[in-house]
C-alpha cells in the first residue's frame, strides 16, 4: 500500500524524520519496503539503515511555483507558444514551450484565472524529458526559433514525479501559495510503500496507518469529519433493501444525492489518488476510491435513475442474495462472469447489478449524464469475499479490504464521508436520512487482562498504568481494576480474540507499541521441562542426512494436488496402483490445481524433475512428507509418512578423458536404497519383481523387510515419462512407506567380537530357471547353510552357451566360519552339498560344472 506523507500528516503529527518513522513502522510489523521522494531531500538518521536514493531534489531557489498569466503564439513556429509566467519576480518571465495542453489558451490574452505549474529558473537541475534513459540536465539560456528562453515550465517527467511527458503540469485551482513559493512546499512529497500482511486489515487505509503511527509516536489521532449537509427531501421511500443472507451481508446502507454534476475531481483529490496509484476518473467515482483509501471503507455509487428505469418507474428494491442457476453478471471491467453458488450478489427486481464486496455491474454505473447518485456502503463476510475473488479470478481494491475484514460499523461512517465529498465536488442536495438495514450486529469484545500475565509473557515489569496507556494509544478503551485491566476492543481490531487468546493478542499489542527493541533479553525463569528424545524425528533426520550424504537434494512440495495430476502416473489401459482410498477434498481450494490432498509423493517428484529438466542434466532428489488417506467413518484421514527418491541423467560428469557419460539405471537407485538401509542398520531386506503400474514392468522391484512390503523402486514407465516430457534419459523413481521403514531401523544395534578363527571361502554356481529371483536362491542357500554360513554374496549372473535357453547361472561367494574352531574342507563340503540338494529340491537348481 502506498502512503503519501502529506496525506498522512492530515490525521497525525509526525515528530520524527520519515526515515526513522519507516524504521519504527517496520519494527512494529508494518514493513516499509520502499521510500519514494518527490522533490524533497533524503534525511539520514543515525542508527537507521537505509538505501541512498538517487532522486532529484528540487532546488528551493530555482524550482518554484509559477502562475501562467498569458499564453502567446510563437511568431516563428506553429508548434510552440510563449508562456508569460509569474514566478514572484519583478516582471513576468517569457518561456517558450511546445506543451500541447497550453495550446487551447493561445491568443486568449491575459487569463482571468492563472494556470499554476512547476517553474524551473535558469541553472535549475531537472530530468531530460526527451531522453529515453534517465538523464539530468542543467537549464541554460538558449533561443528557441529566435525567441530568448532561459526558463522552463515543467512536465511531471522533468520533475521526476512520473513518466508523463505529454504536457506540462497544470493546476487550475489555486494551490494556496503565492507565485515563487519553493515547489518543494507545494508538490514535494514522500511516499511510503508499506507491505501489509493479511492480519493487518486495520491498516489498509491512510487513517489506519495514521492510527498505528499515532500509537507508536504517542500523538493524538485526528479523524476526518463524518458529518454531512442534508437539505434535500427525505430518503424514505426512494429505495428499499432486502438482505436474504445476513451471515454474508450483515449490513447495507444507502444515501442519496440529487441534482449533482459529474465532472473532474478537484486537483488536490486527483493528486492524492495518483500518489496511491489510482487513476482519477470523475468526481463521483473518485470519491468512492478516495474514501476507501482514506478510511478503509469501500463504497459503490449507482446511477439512481437507471435503477428506477429498471424498476419500471418505481422505487428500486435492492436485494442481496446468492445466485440462481445460470445467472451471469457483466462487471464494470466489461467481463461477463458465470456466477458460482457461493457468490453473494447485489440485485434488483430486474436482475444482478453487482458482486458483493468486489465489483459493481455495468448496467447501473455512473456516466456523464448521471444526476442522481445512490451511494452504497455495506459490510460483507470476509471469507466469502476471499473465496469469490479466487473462484472468479478477480482482484480489486475493495475486495482486498473486504477479504481482510471491515467492521460493519464503518459502513455508516464511509457513507456519510462519501456523500458529503460528492456534494462538495459535484453540487446537489443530499437526501435527509440514511437507509440502513443492520440484521447482524457483532458483539462488543471485552477482555480481562491480569497484570501478572502481562509481566509473565512480555518479560517486562509493566505497571497497570503503563499497560493501560499503551493500549489506549492503540485505540482500546481501558478500565483499571485492582490487579487487571478491563479492555474494550475497538471496531478496527477484528483480529483480537476473546479469553486467553485475547489476552495474548493484547499483550502482543502492548509489546508492539512499547517497542520490541526495548525489551531486554532475559533468561527463562521457569524450570526447564524434562528433555525427552523423539526417536521418530531422530530417525527421520537421520534419513535426510544419509540421503544428502549420498548426493541427493531434498525437495518440499505442496501437499495439495488434483486427481487429474495424480492420474498422469497411470499408463493408458492400466489400473492405478495408487491407494484406492477416496481423495480428501478441500472445501475452499486456494487454487484450481490444489483441490485435494495428495495420496502419493510420486507425482510431486516427477513434476519437479520435469520443471528442472531444462536446467539440469542430472537430478538426484528426495522428499519426505505425508500423504492423506481417507478412513471410513472417520473425519480425519490417515497421514502416513512417505519417502520418495528420484534420479535421472548422467551418472558422472563428462571429463576431457571421457567425454561420454553413461546414464543412471536401476542399479544406481538400488545402490542408494541399500546404502540407506545400511545407514539405518536395517537387516532382513529382500527384493522381488514389482507390479506397480507406474513403473517399468521389467526394471522395477518391491522392497520387503522381514516380509513386510515397504515400497517400490525402479524405472518410471516410459509412457508416463513421455507424458511429462522426460524422455532424454531414463527416470529412476522410488516411493517407500517411511513409517514402516523406520520401524525396522535401529539407533542401537548388536555388535560381536572379532573372529578368532580363519574363514573358509567357497564359490558356488547354480543353474536355475530364468524366472527364478536371485533373492529366492539366496534365501534357500542361507537356510541350508545354517550357523556355519556367515555371508552370501551374488557376484555373477550369466545367460548363454552353454547354459540352456530359459535358464541362467547365478554364482555366489560363500563365507564359512565358526567361533569354536577352524573348519575343515570336509565340514565345509558337507554344508556345500546340503546347499546343492536343498536348492535343487525347492527351486529345481543344478550345480554348474
Image (spheres, rainbow, N blue to C red):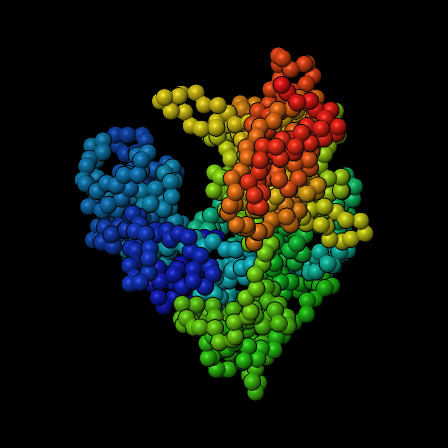
Q: Position of residue 150 (x, y in %)?
A: 20, 42
Instruction: Please give the name of the residue rendered at 51% of the width and 62% of the height, measured from the top-left corner.
Output: 208
Q: Position of residue 179 (x, y in %)?
A: 29, 54
Q: Quadrant of residue 109?
A: top left
Locate residue 702 relative to residue 21 in the image: left or right.
right
Instruction: Please give the name of the residue rendered at 56% of the width and 61% of the height, measured from the top-left corner.
Output: 533
Residue 616 or 111: which is nearer the viewer? Answer: 616
Q: How many marks?
A: 0
Residue 157 or 341: which is nearer the viewer? Answer: 341
Q: Position of residue 23 (x, y in %)?
A: 38, 61
- Examine the rendering and report whether any part of residue 30 can be seen: yes
- Seen in the picture, residue 616 relative to 326 is either above or below; the reply is above
- Examine the rendering and report whether any part of residue 734 can be seen: no
Residue positioned most to the right: 633
- Seen in the picture, residue 439 relative to 753 is either above or below; the reply is below
- Seen in the picture, residue 489 relative to 293 is either above or below; the reply is below
Residue 246 or 412: which is nearer the viewer? Answer: 246
Q: Quadrant of residue 714?
A: top right
Residue positioned most to the bottom: 482
Instruction: Please give the name of the residue rendered at 75% of the width and 56% of the height, measured from the top-left corner.
Output: 245
- Name the quadrant of the C terminus: top right
Instruction: Please give the name of the residue rendered at 59% of the width and 64% of the height, measured from the top-left corner.
Output: 495
Q: Position of residue 441 (x, y in %)?
A: 70, 66
- Seen in the picture, residue 2 relative to 830 is either above or below; the reply is below
Residue 156 or 16: which is nearer the viewer? Answer: 16
Locate residue 449 relative to residue 278 in the image: left or right.
right
Amino acid at each position: 500500500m502506498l502512503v503519501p506523507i502529506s496525506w498522512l500528516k492530515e490525521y497525525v503529527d509526525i515528530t520524527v524524520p520519515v526515515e526513522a518513522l519507516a524504521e519504527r513502522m517496520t519494527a512494529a510489523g508494518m514493513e516499509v519496503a520502499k521510500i519514494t521522494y518527490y522533490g524533497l531531500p533524503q534525511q539520514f538518521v543515525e542508527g537507521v539503515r537505509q538505501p541512498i536514493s538517487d532522486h532529484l531534489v528540487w532546488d528551493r531557489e530555482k524550482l518554484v511555483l509559477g502562475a501562467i498569466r498569458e499564453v502567446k503564439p510563437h511568431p516563428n513556429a506553429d508548434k510552440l507558444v510563449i508562456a508569460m509566467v509569474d514566478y514572484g519576480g519583478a516582471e513576468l518571465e517569457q518561456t517558450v514551450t511546445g506543451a500541447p495542453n497550453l495550446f487551447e489558451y493561445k491568443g486568449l490574452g491575459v487569463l482571468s484565472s492563472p494556470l499554476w505549474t512547476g517553474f524551473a529558473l535558469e541553472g535549475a537541475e531537472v530530468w531530460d524529458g526527451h531522453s529515453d534513459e534517465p538523464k539530468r540536465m542543467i537549464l541554460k539560456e538558449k533561443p528557441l526559433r529566435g525567441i530568448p528562453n532561459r526558463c522552463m515550465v515543467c512536465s511531471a517527467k522533468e520533475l521526476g514525479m512520473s513518466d508523463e511527458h505529454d504536457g506540462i503540469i497544470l493546476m487550475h485551482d489555486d494551490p494556496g501559495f503565492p507565485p515563487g513559493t519553493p515547489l518543494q512546499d507545494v508538490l514535494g512529497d514522500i511516499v511510503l510503500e508499506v507491505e501489509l500482511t493479511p492480519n493487518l486489515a486495520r491498516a489498509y487505509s491512510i487513517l489506519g496507518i495514521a492510527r498505528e503511527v499515532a500509537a507508536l509516536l504517542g500523538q493524538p489521532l485526528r479523524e476526518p469529519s463524518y458529518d454531512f449537509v442534508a437539505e434535500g427531501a427525505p430518503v424514505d421511500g426512494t429505495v428499499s433493501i432486502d438482505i436474504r443472507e445476513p451471515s454474508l451481508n450483515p449490513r447495507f446502507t444507502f444515501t442519496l444525492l440529487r441534482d449533482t454534476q459529474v465532472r473532474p475531481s478537484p486537483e488536490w483529490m486527483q493528486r492524492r489518488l495518483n500518489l496511491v496509484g489510482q487513476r482519477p476518473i470523475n468526481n463521483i467515482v473518485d470519491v468512492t476510491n478516495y474514501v476507501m483509501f482514506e478510511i478503509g471503507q469501500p463504497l459503490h455509487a449507482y446511477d439512481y435513475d437507471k435503477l428506477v428505469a429498471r424498476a419500471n418507474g418505481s422505487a428500486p428494491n435492492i436485494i442481496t442474495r446468492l445466485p440462481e442457476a445460470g445467472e451471469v453478471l457483466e462487471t464494470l471491467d466489461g467481463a461477463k462472469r458465470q456466477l458460482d453458488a457461493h457468490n453473494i450478489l447485489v440485485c434488483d427486481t430486474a436482475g444482478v447489478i453487482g458482486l458483493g464486496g468486489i465489483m459493481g455491474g455495468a448496467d447501473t454505473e455512473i456516466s456523464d449524464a448521471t444526476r442522481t447518485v445512490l451511494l452504497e456502503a455495506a459490510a460483507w463476510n470476509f471469507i466469502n469475499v476471499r473465496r469469490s475473488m479466487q473462484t472468479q479470478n478477480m482482484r480489486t481494491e475493495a475486495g482486498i479490504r473486504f477479504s481482510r475484514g471491515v467492521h460493519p460499523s464503518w459502513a455508516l461512517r464511509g457513507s456519510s464521508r462519501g456523500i458529503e465529498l460528492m456534494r462538495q465536488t459535484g453540487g446537489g442536495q443530499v437526501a435527509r436520512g440514511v437507509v440502513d438495514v443492520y440484521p447482524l450486529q457483532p458483539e462488543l469484545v471485552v477482555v480481562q487482562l491480569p497484570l501478572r500475565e502481562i509481566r509473565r509473557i512480555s518479560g517486562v515489569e509493566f505497571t497497570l498504568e503503563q499497560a493501560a496507556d499503551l493500549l489506549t494509544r492503540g485505540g482500546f478503551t481501558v478500565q483499571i481494576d485492582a490487579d487487571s485491566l478491563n479492555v474494550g476492543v475497538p471496531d478496527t481490531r477484528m483480529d483480537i480474540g476473546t479469553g486467553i487468546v485475547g489476552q495474548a493478542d493484547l499483550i502482543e499489542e502492548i509489546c508492539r507499541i512499547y517497542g520490541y527493541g526495548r525489551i531486554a533479553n532475559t533468561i527463562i525463569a521457569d524450570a526447564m521441562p524434562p528433555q525427552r528424545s523423539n526417536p521418530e524425528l531422530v530417525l527421520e533426520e537421520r534419513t535426510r542426512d544419509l540421503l544428502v550424504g549420498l548426493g541427493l537434494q531434498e525437495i518440499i512440495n505442496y501437499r495439495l494436488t488434483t486427481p487429474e495430476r495424480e492420474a498422469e502416473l497411470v499408463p493408458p489401459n492400466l489400473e492405478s496402483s495408487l491407494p484406492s482410498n477416496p481423495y480428501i477434498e478441500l472445501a475452499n481450494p486456494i487454487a484450481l490445481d490444489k483441490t485435494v490432498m495428495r495420496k502419493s509423493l510420486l507425482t510431486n517428484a516427477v513434476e519437479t524433475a520435469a520443471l528442472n529438466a531444462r536446467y539440469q542434466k542430472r537430478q538426484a532428489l528426495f522428499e519426505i512428507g505425508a500423504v492423506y488417506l481417507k478412513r471410513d467413518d472417520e473425519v480425519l484421514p490417515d497421514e502416513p509418512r512417505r519417502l520418495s527418491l528420484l534420479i535421472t541423467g548422467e551418472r558422472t560428469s563428462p571429463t576431457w578423458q571421457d567425454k561420454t557419460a553413461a546414464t543412471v539405471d536401476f542399479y544406481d537407485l538400488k545402490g542408494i536404497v541399500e546404502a540407506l538401509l545400511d545407514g539405518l542398520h536395517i537387516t532382513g531386506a529382500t527384493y522381488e519383481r514389482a507390479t506397480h503400474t507406474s513403473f517399468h514392468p521389467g526394471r522395477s522391484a518391491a522392497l520387503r523387510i522381514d516380509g513386510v512390503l515397504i515400497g517400490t523402486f525402479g524405472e518410471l514407465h516410459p509412457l508416463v515419462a513421455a507424458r511429462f516430457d522426460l524422455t532424454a534419459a531414463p527416470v529412476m523413481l522410488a516411493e517407500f512407506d517411511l513409517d514402516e521403514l523406520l520401524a525396522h531401523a535401529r539407533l542401537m544395534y548388536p555388535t560381536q567380537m572379532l573372529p578368532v578363527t580363519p574363514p573358509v571361502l567357497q564359490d558356488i554356481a547354480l543353474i536355475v530357471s530364468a524366472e527364478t529371483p536371485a533373492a529366492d536362491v539366496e534365501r534357500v542357500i542361507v537356510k541350508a547353510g545354517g550357523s556355519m554360513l556367515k555371508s552370501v554374496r551374488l557376484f555373477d549372473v550369466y545367460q548363454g552357451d552353454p547354459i540352456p535357453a530359459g535358464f541362467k547361472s547365478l554364482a555366489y561367494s560363500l563365507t564359512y566360519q565358526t567361533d569354536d574352531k577352524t573348519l575343515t574342507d570336509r565340514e565345509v563340503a558337507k554344508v556345500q552339498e546340503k546347499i546343492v540338494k536343498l536348492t535343487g529340491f525347492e527351486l529345481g537348481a543344478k550345480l554348474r560344472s
